[in-house]
Image: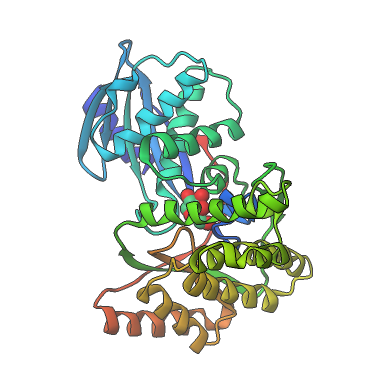
Amino acid sequence: MKEKTQQVFKEKFGDGGVAYASPGRINLIGEHTDYNGGFVLPGAIDKAIYAVVKPNGTNKVRAFAVDLNEASEFGLEEKDKPKEGFAKYIFGVAREMLKRGKTVPGFDVVIAGDVPLGAGMSSSAALESAVGFALNDQYQLGFTRQELATIGQATEHNYVGVKCGIMDQFASCMGKEGSLIRLDCRSLEHQYVPFDPKGYQLVLLNTCVTHELASSAYNKRRESCERVVEVIAKKHPEVKLLRDANLDWLKEVKTQVSAEDYMRAEFVIEEIQRLLDTCEALKKGDYETVGKKMYETHAGLSKKYEVSCPELDFLNDQAKAAGVTGSRVMGGGFGGCTINLVKDGKVADFVKTASTAYEKKFGIKPKVYDVVIKDGAHKL
Ligand code: GLA
């Protein structure tokens, strides 16, 4: 992948491009908790977005996306926002760096990658982090990895229109081989949790569907949470985010919020607790409990947060029927992957049965990925 990206750079822009990569991520548990100040448990994976970059001595960016076979050229003033989807991420990252007082001259960049798009593995965060890491290195801007994650998140907010949390960019920038990151999304305090579940494997099954409007539905979920916080805070002013609330305080406002908002907030508060319980279980090597929590998360995401879809629910049911230890939709939802914690001896059968049944029902062959947890953004 690195060679291919460098080759394309050479063809388009000549010699001297420097290659960087930043990975996608998985998340064991803790979904839709990040923008509520809760906890998440992601890890960077062995699939990445590659960026080959070289300053070009102008004030313009020339960008090419190999996988889309698409080019874009743009300046770096606010008015110059490109129309090509992939280029908005590059523009956004550079703009956010400029807004933080740095100088970012023009550059040439070629992008490629093997993080599947729309699979819930955060290809967009990987792109932001790869470009951020590359520019930071090329122009010696002095941002920390954590700041680069924040720059990626701000890019989503201000140039893509998704009001995402910090999980994906944090995992992509801060990932560590063999470890999950237990991240407190309110303080950004984090611990690396070595993850090597003896006797089990993590398997991703990609539904290969992405339902439309995922980003606007995502923003709506966030708004629901914010509305509930506003009401709870009237009585409990210390509540700034759902992380600060509890189920009793939520119950107090049941008649003052819509049934839908209530359900959303209930899921989030329960999910934050589920993550803490899962971390305890992990410490003891109790993977049966970890798996049980994953199923609970799926049920919550499907019934209360309503970010699942028939394809994901079907794969979750398949996992249950096959006696898989844990299974749930991963990431923002509305398509993408289920993440499955499977006993070694059951992997082959489960993958075969679930794939065959899924293809029969939906006419699409799901993609299967083993999870390998790797380091975050790096120069190649
Ligand atoms: C997307 C967002 C993340 C997070 C997840 C859901 O991946 O980018 O910030 O909210 O959805 O947990």
- Residue 235 at x, y = what percent? 71, 53
The answer to whether residue 44 is visible is no
Q: Is residue 341 above or below residue 330?
A: below
Which residue is drawn at the image coordinates 47% and 73% (left, top)? 302
Pick whichever, 373 or 42, lies toward us.
42
- Residue 152 at x, y = what percent? 48, 36
Instruction: Indicate the quadrant where residue 200 lies.
Output: bottom right
Instruction: Indicate the quadrant where residue 342 lies.
Output: bottom right
Which residue is drawn at the image coordinates 58% and 56% (left, top)? 228
Which residue is drawn at the image coordinates 38% and 14% (left, top)? 105
Instruction: Indicate the quadrant where residue 326 lies.
Output: bottom right
Q: Quadrant of the N terminus?
A: top left
Q: Is residue 284 above or below residue 44?
A: below
Residue found farthest to the right:
284
- Residue 226 at x, y = what percent? 55, 51
Residue found farthest to the top:
57
Residue found farthest to the bottom:
321
- Residue 25 at x, y = what percent? 51, 53
